[in-house]
Amino acid sequence: MRAAAVRVRRALAMRSYDGLFRAAVWVLGVLLLVTLAGPFVGVGGQPDAIVGPRLMPPGAGWPLGTDNLGRSLLPRLLQGIGTTLLLSCLAVACTALISTALGVIAGYRGGRTAEVILRIGDVLYSFPAIVLAVLVAAVLGPGRTAALAAIVLVTVPLMTRMVGTAARAVARREFVTAARISGVRAPTIMLRHILPNVAGTVAVQGTYALSVGILVEGGLSFLGYGVQLPDASLGLLIQEGGLYMVGAPWLIVAPGVVLVAAIMAINLVGDSLRDRFEPRETRSLV
Amino acid sequence: MSGEPVLELDDVGVVFRSGRRHTVTAMAGVTFRIAAGETLGLVGESGSGKTTTGAVALGLRRPTSGTVRFLGAQHGGRRTRAGAIQAVLQNPHWSLNPRLTVADSVAEPLSAVEGGRLRTHHPAALRILDRVGLSASYAERLPHELSGGQRQRVAIARALITHPKFIVFDEAVSALDVSVQAQILNLVHDLQSEQGFGALFISHDLAAVRYLAHRVAVMRAGQIVELADAHRFYITPQHPYSRQLLETL
C-alpha cells in the first residue's frame, strides 16, 4: 500500500512533467471548470434566453455574438462543451472497462480466446470510424444513446488490441509463470499480476480514445445523428455555425477553436503519459 | 539421499506441431526419477529440450506420450498440487512482479494454498526472507530496488514458503555474476539439507551443476544421452557428447 501511495504521489508531482503537458492540463482544467461552474454562476446568462438581435457580432450583452434566433453564443457554447465532454468521458469509461477486461483475458489466455476477441475487433476496426458511427445511429435512432454507443464501438477495437498486446507481453513474464506454478487462480493472476502492469497502457489509450470520442460525437452531431436540438454540443454548434459561416463566422469559429484545443490538449496529455509508461516512442504531435 | 521418489518421468515424449505437417520432437523417451532430498542436474546446449523437460516436470506442459508421476500419482489439475511444486526461474529481472512488494511476492504462494489476503501471510514471509539472508527491512521494497542476487533470493524464498516437495531451478543462477552465483548455490545447498526437497537443476553451466547435483543427466536433441552419479560423471563421462561438454568447462 505504501508503494501504491508513493506511485500516486510521483504521478501527481507536476514538476516532473514538461511544459507542454502542463499547458495541456491547464487547458483541460479550464474547460472542465467553466462547464462545471458555468451553469451555477450563470456565465453569459441562460442558454435558451433570447438576448438581442439575430446574428450579432460579439458585443457587450453577448460576448461571443448571437445566433440565428438571437440567443447568446457563450452559454450555449459552455453547455455544448459540457455535453460533449460528459458524453465522451462516459463513453470512454465504458470503452476502458470493456477493452481492459477483454484485453487482459485475451492476453492471459492467448490461443483461440485471443484469436476470437482480436478478430472481432479487427472486423470493427476495418470500418471507417464515422461510417460505423452513422450505422449505429441509424440502428438506434439519433440521440445521446446513439452517440455514446457509437463512440464505444469505434474506440473499443483499438484499445482492446493495445491492452491485449501489452497483457500478452506481461503474461509471458516469469512472475506470471511462477504464480501459475504456485497454484494461484487465473482470476487472481489477471487482477494481481496482469492488470497493474498494463495500467499505463490503459491510461494512455484512454486519453487517445477520449479525443477520438470527442471527434466522433462532433461528427455525428454535425451530420444530425448525435445530440438533438434544443440541446447543444460542440458538433451541433459547428453544424449550426456552418450555415451562417459567411455572415456570422464567430458562430463556427468559437466552438471550432474549443474543439481543436480540447483534442490537442488531450493528445498531449496522452503523449506525456506514454512517454512516462512506454518511453521508447516519440510524440505524435509537435 | 535415496528417499521415496517425488517425481518420476517414464518414457516421456513431447512433440510440437509447427505448421500443418511439420513436427518438432522436443523430448523423446525421457525417463528419470528424483528422490526426496536429491538434486538431479540437467545439462545440455540450448534447444536440447531442457526447458521443455522442466515444463513437463512442473505440469505446465502435457506430454505427448509417457507418464509423469508426482508423489506416486499422475499429474492432475494444477490446483491439486498447489504449493507442493515450486520453481525458481531464469531471469531475475522478471522473476518478480515489479508492482508487488517483496513481502507480497513471497507471501503469494502461501495465500494460494491456504487462502486469505497476502498481508495475513507476511509474518511467514518475513521468517523465510530471514532464512534466505534478507532482513525485514527488505520486506516493503519493490523489486527494482534490489540487486539481481537479492531478487533471486526473494524468488527462492517465494518457492520455499510452502515447504514444497519438489523445486525446479531453471537456469536459476545463470544470469548472476560468479561470486553471487556461489552464494546462491550455497544457500540452495543448505536449504535442501534442511528441508529435504527434491530438485531438478536445469543449467548449461556444468560448474554450477557440479556444485549441487547428486546425479547428472545430459540431454541432446530431446533425449537423455547419459545419466550418472555426479562424482562418477565428472571423472569418467561415458558418452562422447558428455566428454565434449566437459572439455569446454
Image (tube, rainbow, N blue to C red):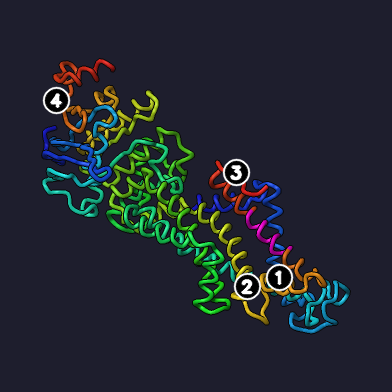
Is A263 magenta? The answer is: yes
As helix, strand or loop, the secondary structure at mark 2 comes to helix
- A40 vs A5, left or right, is right
As helix, strand or loop, the secondary structure at mark 1 comes to helix
Name the kind of residue labelled 1 in the image: Ile
| Image vertical order of residue B246 relative to residue A50, above or below | above
Q: Which residue is mark 4?
A: B228
Q: Is there CB contact under 8 Å for labels 3 and 1?
A: no
Q: Is there CB contact under 8 Å for labels 2 and 4?
A: no
Name the kind of residue labelled 4 in the image: Ala
Q: Residue at x 55, y 59 (%)?
A: A206
Pointer 3 or 1: first along the chain: 1
Q: Residues within 10 Å of mark 2 (few under 14, many from 20)?
A: some
Q: Which residue is mark 2?
A: A223
Q: Residue at x 58, y 64 (%)?
A: A213
Q: Which residue is mark 3?
A: A282
Q: Is there CB contact under 8 Å for labels 4 and 1?
A: no
Query: Does residue B57 appear in this view?
Result: no
Are tags 4 and 1 found on a single chain? no
* Foreground tag (4 vs 1): 1
Name the kind of residue labelled 2 in the image: Leu
- A212 vs B180, left or right, is right
Are tags 3 and 4 found on a single chain? no
Are tags 1 and 2 found on a single chain? yes
Q: Which residue is mark 1?
A: A238
- B41 vs B107, left or right, is left
